[in-house]
Amino acid sequence: MNLKITFAVSTYNRLDTLKDFQLSLSLVNGLDRCNVRIYDDCSTEFNEAFLEKLFPYAAEINVRSKNVGSSMTYYLMFKEFLKTKDDVIFFADSDLVFDPNCLKFIQDNFLYTDGFLSVYNSAMHKSFREITIMGNEYIEKEMIGSAGTAIGRDLVKDIVTTLPHRIGLSYDWLYSDYLYNVKKIRMLVSKRSYVQHIGFYGSNCNGLNILDYGLNFESNNIINSNIVLKYLEKFAFTLINTEKDDAYNKMIESIYGSITYKVGHAVLLPAKKLRNFLNSFR
């Protein structure tokens, strides 16, 4: 069965990151068989005309008349998805890069899930069990963010009907708690990340001692490798100006892990240069 997938892209400013996102997205296999839908939260760095030029293949582009924040954006994306005839919504935040086969993995494996599948194995979200389904390794987690997550239509309808948006609460954490603790849905995450996070400065990363990245990601092309390396270098330069305390040393250790293994083998060689660079500031 070929699932009809809404490739839901949430955007808000960060123009340079958005351009890198688009470069990586353009190499995703099967993107032409998806409905790419852009949801912009009233950006000030670009307008609808720019988005139309950057994403000429988009099925639709929605630009908010006022900024509503990321949590409300997710809620509204769910509601607008239900107006389509698509089977699955896949959340693709605009600070991600993609394994070219991420959509193929979702198409091949989504029907073996409970209607919920994440291809972003975040280092920040604890796992409690590893399982194998049809030869693929998965992690089960209790909480998962929206980025890199595919959710089936029936679950989306259940979520929107049951959970109104609540000011001050993150909507993805709200529905994760509902699906896991109330619906008893398996929160399956591919052990290998098929998307990688490059938004080292945002709501989930502060550029200093919090780094959200996908475990076991493989770049698989030079464009992804160069993009990831660029953001790691920027992250490293920020660290130069931090105090060399315990928090700094822990972050260095965290970056070592992300470079040598968790970012992926395709960036391993250039990343060794970055490790040497970081060592010079210890």
Image: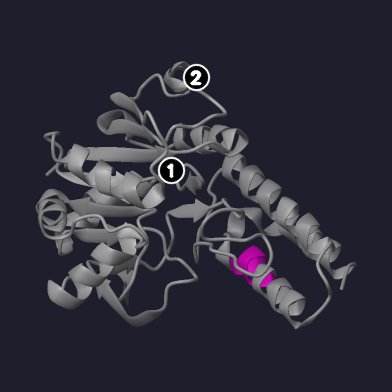
Q: Which mark is residue 33?
A: none
Above or below for 1 versus 141? above
Residue 22, can we see it?
yes
How crowded pointer 1 is (Cα within 10 Å; few <14, some 14-19, many 20+) is rated as many
Between 160 and 240, the one lying in front of the other is 160
Q: Is residue 178 left or right of residue 23?
A: left
Above or below for 43 versus 172? above
Q: Residue at x 51, y 46 (%)?
A: 95
For residue 258: magenta? yes
- CA gap between label 1 and label 2 equals 25 Å
Above or below for 270 versus 34? below
Query: Which image quarter is the C terminus in?
Result: bottom right
Residue designated by label 1 = 100
Type of amino acid under label 1:
Pro
Image coordinates for residue 217, horizontal then vertical, percent: 50, 59
Q: Residue at x 66, y 70 (%)?
A: 209
Image coordinates for residue 119, horizontal then vertical, percent: 36, 58
Q: Residue at x 28, y 58 (%)?
A: 166
Q: Depth-wise, is mark 1 or mark 2 nearer the camera?
A: 2
Residue designated by label 2 = 50
Closer to the chain start, of discs 1 and 2, is 2
How crowded pointer 2 is (Cα within 10 Å; few <14, some 14-19, many 20+) is rated as few
Q: Which residues are magenta?
A: 256-261
Above or below for 103 versus 155? above
Image coordinates for residue 222, horizontal then vertical, percent: 61, 41
Q: Could you say which quadrant of the image residue 134 lies in?
A: bottom left
Q: Could you say which quadrant of the image residue 185 lies in?
A: bottom left
Between 242 and 263, the one lying in front of the other is 242
Residue 104, can we see it?
no
Q: Is residue 269 left or right of residue 258?
A: right
